[in-house]
């Protein structure tokens, strides 16, 4: 009998990555009208603050969902940032400057 602790594939053994910074420009998601909880995240449009690239990320293409957060990755490899569901639920498009 093995009494050694094993790492579960459902629980990441390392903290969520946070070595990049992004401005979220658009969040396309299906939300529960009662709770505001994100039922499905279709895509994010973001600007990488390191290389200034504006890109659209979808699940498996620049966006990875974990149980704790959504991880956004710059296509140029600048970095990645984890966004918790509460941040994405509260996101609102910035007003346009005149």
Image (tube, grey):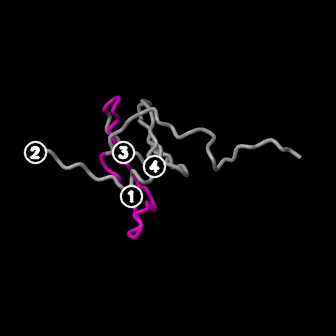
Mark seen at residue 3: none
Q: Residues within 10 Å of mark 3 (few under 14, many from 20)?
A: some
Which of the two marks, 4 or 1, is nearer to us in this view? 4
Q: Residues within 10 Å of mark 4 (few under 14, many from 20)?
A: some
Give the residue number, with chain letter if any, for mark 3.
Answer: 56
State which quarter of the image contains the C terminus: top left
Residue 48 % position (x, y): 35, 35
- Residue occupying image coordinates x 44% and y 30%: 77
Calculate the distance from the C-alpha at mark 3 to the C-alpha at mark 2. Answer: 25 Å
- What element does badge 1 sit on? strand
Residue 10 % position (x, y): 64, 50
Give the residue number, with chain letter if any, for mark 1.
Answer: 29
Mark seen at residue 84: 4
- Residue occupying image coordinates x 75% and y 43%: 6
- Residue occupying image coordinates x 53% and y 50%: 68
Instruction: Tell me which label, 3 or 2, sits earlier in the chain.
Output: 3
- What element does badge 3 sit on? strand
Instruction: Tell me which label, 4 or 3, sits earlier in the chain.
Output: 3
Q: Are marks 1 and 3 in contact (CB under 8 Å)?
A: no
- What element does badge 2 sit on? loop
Q: Which residues are magenta?
A: 25-52
């Amino acid at each position: 009998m093995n009494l050694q602790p094993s790492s579960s594939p459902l629980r990441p053994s390392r903290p969520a990555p946070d070595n990049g910074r992004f401005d979220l420009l658009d969040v396309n998601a299906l939300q529960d009208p009662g709770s505001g909880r994100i039922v499905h995240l279709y895509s994010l449009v973001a600007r990488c603050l390191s290389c200034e690239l504006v890109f659209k990320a979808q699940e498996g293409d620049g966006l990875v969902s974990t149980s704790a957060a959504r991880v956004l990755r710059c296509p140029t490899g600048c970095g990645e940032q984890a966004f918790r569901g509460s941040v994405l639920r509260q996101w609102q498009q910035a007003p346009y400057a005149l």
